[in-house]
C-alpha cells in the first residue's frame, strides 16, 4: 500500500509542476547533427561518427559492407558503408512529426 501512495505522490508532483519532458529533444539534436554534415558523399564512417557519435547498431553485410544505424525517440537513420568504410547511401530515415 505504501508503494501505491509513493508512486501516486511522484506522479501528482510531476503533473502539478507543469514541466513536461520533451521526448523528441534528443531526436532533433541527432537529426541536426546529420544535417550539419551536408552531402556525405566521400565521407568515411569515422568522419560521420566524429559529428554524430557512435551508431546504436551495426550489421556486417557481405563483401565487407556495413549498415550502421543511429536512433533516438522520434528519429532513425540507417547508412550503408562500403568495404573501405566510405559512405554509400542512406538506406532509411524516419522523422516523427
Image (spheres, rainbow, N blue to C red):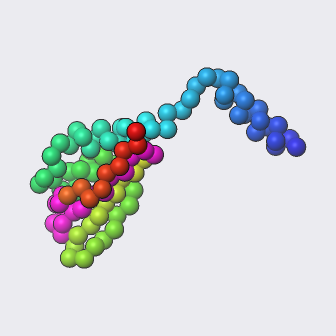
Q: Quadrant of residue 59?
A: bottom left
- The structure residue drawn at horizontal position 34% and vertical position 57%, both measured from the top left corner, is 69
- Is 29 drawn above or below residue 52 in the view shown? above
Q: Position of residue 97 (x, y in %)?
A: 40, 39
- The structure residue drawn at horizontal position 15% and vertical position 46%, both measured from the top left corner, is 39
Q: Quadrant of residue 51?
A: top left
Where, quadrant-wise, is the N terminus in this rendering? top right
In the rendered structure, which segment of residues is drawn in magenta? 73-88
Q: Position of residue 92 (x, y in %)?
A: 30, 56
- The structure residue drawn at horizontal position 20% and vertical position 43%, both measured from the top left corner, is 37
- Tell me: 52 left or right of 4: left
- Tell me: 34 left or right of 72: left
Tell me, yes or no, whether the highlighted magenta stretch contains residue 85. Answer: yes
* Residue placed most toward the observer, 23 or 58: 23
- Tell me: 41 left or right of 93: left
Q: Quadrant of residue 17?
A: top right
Q: Position of residue 75 (x, y in %)?
A: 38, 46
Tell me, yes or no, whether the highlighted magenta stretch contains residue 28. Answer: no
User: Residue extending furthest front?
Assistant: 97
User: Residue extending furthest right?
Assistant: 1
Asked whether residue 54 is in view, the answer is: no
- Tell me: 63 left or right of 52: left
How many labels sit on residues?
0
Asked whether residue 48 is in view, the answer is: yes
User: Residue extending furthest bottom?
Assistant: 62
- Is 97 drawn above or below residue 80 in the view shown? above
- The structure residue drawn at horizontal position 35% and vertical position 49%, both measured from the top left corner, is 94
User: Residue extending furthest left?
Assistant: 42
Q: Position of residue 9 (x, y in %)?
A: 76, 32
Amino acid at each position: 500500500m505504501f508503494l501505491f501512495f509513493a508512486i501516486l505522490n511522484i506522479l501528482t508532483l510531476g503533473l502539478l509542476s507543469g514541466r513536461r519532458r520533451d521526448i523528441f529533444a534528443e531526436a532533433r539534436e541527432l537529426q541536426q547533427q546529420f544535417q550539419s554534415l551536408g552531402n556525405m558523399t566521400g565521407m568515411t564512417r569515422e568522419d560521420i561518427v566524429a559529428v554524430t557519435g557512435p551508431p546504436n547498431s551495426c550489421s556486417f553485410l557481405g563483401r565487407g559492407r556495413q549498415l550502421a544505424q543511429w536512433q533516438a525517440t522520434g528519429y532513425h537513420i540507417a547508412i550503408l558503408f562500403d568495404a573501405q568504410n566510405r559512405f554509400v547511401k542512406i538506406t532509411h530515415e524516419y522523422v516523427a512529426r
